[in-house]
Amino acid sequence: MVAPAGIIYDEAEFQRMQTEIADLGLRTVFGDHVRNRHGYFAGTDENRAADLNSMFENPDINGIMAVRGGWGCARILPHLDFELIAQNPKVYCGFSDNTTLHHAFMAYSNLQSFHGPNGNSEWTDLTKQIFESVVMNGDRTSYKSNSRVETLVPGKATGRLIGGNLSILATTLGTPYQSDFNNAILFVEDIGEDTYKIDRMMSHLEQAGILAEISGFVFGKCTDCSAGTPPTFSLMEVLDHYLSRHEVPAIYNADIGHEPDNFTIPMGGMAELDAGNGVITLLEPGVE
């Protein structure tokens, strides 16, 4: 367990993480700096990067998970040893601000990491089941949400699963950490963003050419996202505005995001999206 971004303030949270991970049959080792404080970060940029580098280097560690998101992953990128990470490939799992790390790992270490629960997630039955299936068993899992999934554009698509938190993903565009979205199934989620901000970010993706490159689109949860004061658009209207003219199969409300049920998705893994049935199926295992 490492803290590449924000702080865990409650010591009881660390105990809960250990219990949840133990239920999966795994032993937890915390990074040296996870309890540090540096402003709103869990230690200095150098501290947080050092924990991540050392966990990749340590042969006794089989997998790495972020304790939480927040903000701060982008600040540690200059301090990460991407060659060391490439030479010691391991599972890395997390979401939200960890989106930055997923894209950086793909760009500089050719590492397939996992967009999934953080240590402080709620770890529902579905969250545990999918994590075990994808990360521990290497199954070609079919993701079927407990939530009601809406079909935005029907059809089927095949491609690599690329994405993460929409707000963070947008900040990677035009940087050395930008991913290749050609024929990818783009998945995104967000929290606490008004609809007009989602509109702005979707416009950014379109103008950057991303929406014209992808083969499919999945919007997970937009938790605590407000339509704002009338006159306004609903989130569905905004998504339809961009996706209908690109005619790529697309769904909304999949169990991806800042809510208890949260799928674990191998970044860069080949998958099929069946938008009519709201199902995503891995076409290859996420681990060897």
Image (cartoon, rainbow, N blue to C red):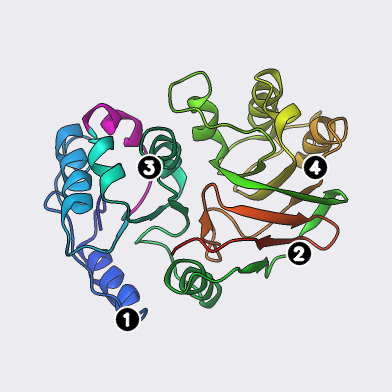
Q: Is residue 3 above or below residue 129?
A: above
Q: Is residue 145 left or right of residue 133?
A: right
Rounded to the nearest whole Å, what is the CA distance between mark 2 and mark 1? 31 Å
Given residues 52 and 261, the one toward you in this image is: 52
The mark found on residue 236 in the picture is: 4
Rounded to the nearest whole Å, what is the CA distance between mark 3 and mark 4? 26 Å
User: For the residue carrying disc 3, how many other residues have a C-alpha within 10 Å: few (<14), some (14-19), or many (20+)?
Assistant: some
Q: Of callouts 3 and 4, which one flags the residue occurring earlier in the amino acid sequence?
A: 3
Q: Are marks 4 and 2 in contact (CB under 8 Å)?
A: no
Please give the name of the residue rendered at 42% of the width and 36% of the height, measured from the top-left corner: 100
Q: Are marks 2 and 3 in contact (CB under 8 Å)?
A: no
Q: Is residue 16 above or below residue 217?
A: below
Q: Of callouts 4 and 2, which one flags the residue occurring earlier in the amino acid sequence?
A: 2
Q: Is residue 97 left or right of residue 153?
A: left
Mark 2 sits on what residue? 148
Q: Of callouts 2 and 1, which one flags the residue occurring earlier in the amino acid sequence?
A: 1
Rounded to the nearest whole Å, what is the CA distance between mark 4 and mark 2? 14 Å
Please give the name of the residue rendered at 43% of the width and 42% of the height, measured from the top-left corner: 102
Q: Nearer the viewer, mark 2 or mark 1?
A: 1
The mark found on residue 2 in the picture is: none
Mark 1 sits on what residue? 25
Magenta stretch, residue numbers: 68-79
At numbered mark 1, what does the secondary structure look like: helix, strand or loop? Answer: loop
Numbered-mark total: 4
